[in-house]
Amino acid sequence: MNPEPTSATRPDVLVVGGGIGGLGTAFALSRKGLKVRVLEQAPEYGEVGAGLQIAPNCTRILADYGLLDEAKSLGVVPENMVMRDAVDSRELTRLDLRDLERRYGFPYMVIHRSDLHGIFLRACERAGVELLNNQTVVAYENTEGGAQVRLKDGRVESAPLVVAADGLHSVARRDLIGDEPVSSSYVAYRAAVPIEQVQDNGVAANDVTVYVGPQRHFVQYALRGGEMFNQVAVFESPKAIAGLEDWGTPDELDAAFEGSCDTVLQGIPLMWRDRWWRMFDREPIETWVHGRIALLGDAAHPPLQYMAQGAIMAIEDGWVLAEHYARLAEAAPAGAEPGWDGALAAYEAVRVEHCRRILTTGRVWGALWHLDGEPRLRRNAIMRARDTYDYSFTDWVYGPTALTPDEEPEMFTPIPLSSAVIEEPVA
């Protein structure tokens, strides 16, 4: 048996998972005067992967945290986001990211995932967050006045609130919801290389460029002050569609990008081939809060990557939860217990619908990117007709993070493919 933690050692909040969402939440809550303990199963804190895009709805929060200058020193503020056809390389549409910053008040940035994680890790250390490693949580349970987790070694940790930020394969999601991740049959390859390796490949080092093509797309942008160049190659795996276990392999990568434009073809040989990321999401759920256990980040709403909002949503989750806690704590009588039930209800009331919109729009956006034949030409025509400074498709997501449902902006109005006038012959 493990002894019951004393009030001196028992935290106000347990956060399970030390990724970007977990650390962001731990920092957000610690800023409100709470004692936070983070349980991370890995032997040390770190992130794998390469580049990450952080839109104004995230850089606004980083500014609130006092972390934006550090992020800008480690990342890149690109000039444009440009979408091109992966087959013929023609420009389809663009966002002027400097004008975007003027509209929303905060920049659109790209940063290495490990750098953003490190920013939050250092912030947590400065704030006095207790950061523990080698802590594998195997079960969650509500208790009177709080919740607890059981670890693989048999120990029990408890707190008035447990935040489950334990990712796509969340143990809390398994225990509380019981659903499974949904495979998209798409897989991502990544690479971050010295900028010198791509300078002769026709790349736009000052832009985020997305090449969209039949059952594939390719993303490029600079990292770390322009010293590195990030590339992401995503494609639909025939092996996955056939139900094979070994899918997304390098031979499929090469086959998927045959017939692409020169810039894309020159980038494919640079992709890391010893690891790849199969793309999963989950069906949206309406309930994230179960007693004093709250799902957060990918445990609550793992998206496909097309909206580039996965890490951002997790950071927003933590900010919203902390803001609602602080609001209720300030209004509470002196010496009263924190109003966690009210804060959790307010958190769930606003975040569920916003994140559902991101998940479902991401699925549609991915399907739109990967069209072939006449639908591809119709998509291209619609995108070319868009004005660079039309923000009707971004206002609903890049504006200030809503704290209440009435602050959530209206969704954009989709343009049907059938409305497009095709100006080029169907191949």
Image (tube, helix red, strand yellow):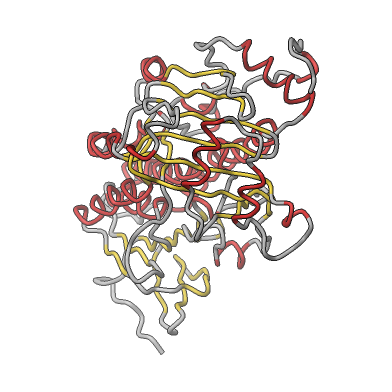
User: Eyeballing the image, is 80 above or below 352?
Assistant: above
Residue 389, x across and y down, in percent: 50, 11
User: Eyeballing the image, is 268 above or below 146?
Assistant: above
> Residue drawn at (39%, 73%), measured in percent from left and top?
135
User: Eyeballing the image, is 13 above or below 383?
Assistant: below
Answer left or right for 352 relative to 332.
right
Q: Quadrant of the C terminus?
A: top right
Answer left or right for 318 relative to 88.
left
User: Farthest residue toward the bottom?
Assistant: 1
- 317 or 251: nearer the viewer: 251
Counting the numbered discs, the total is: 0
Residue 330, x across and y down, in percent: 31, 42
User: Eyeballing the image, is 218 above or below 99?
Assistant: below
Q: Quadrant of the N terminus?
A: bottom left
Residue 148 falls in image quadrant: bottom left
Res 278 visible: yes
Residue 413, x across and y down, in percent: 67, 19
- 194 or 347: nearer the viewer: 194
Res 342 visible: no
Residue 285, x across and y down, in percent: 65, 49
- 174 or 122: nearer the viewer: 122
> Residue drawn at (22%, 57%), measured in percent from left and top?
125
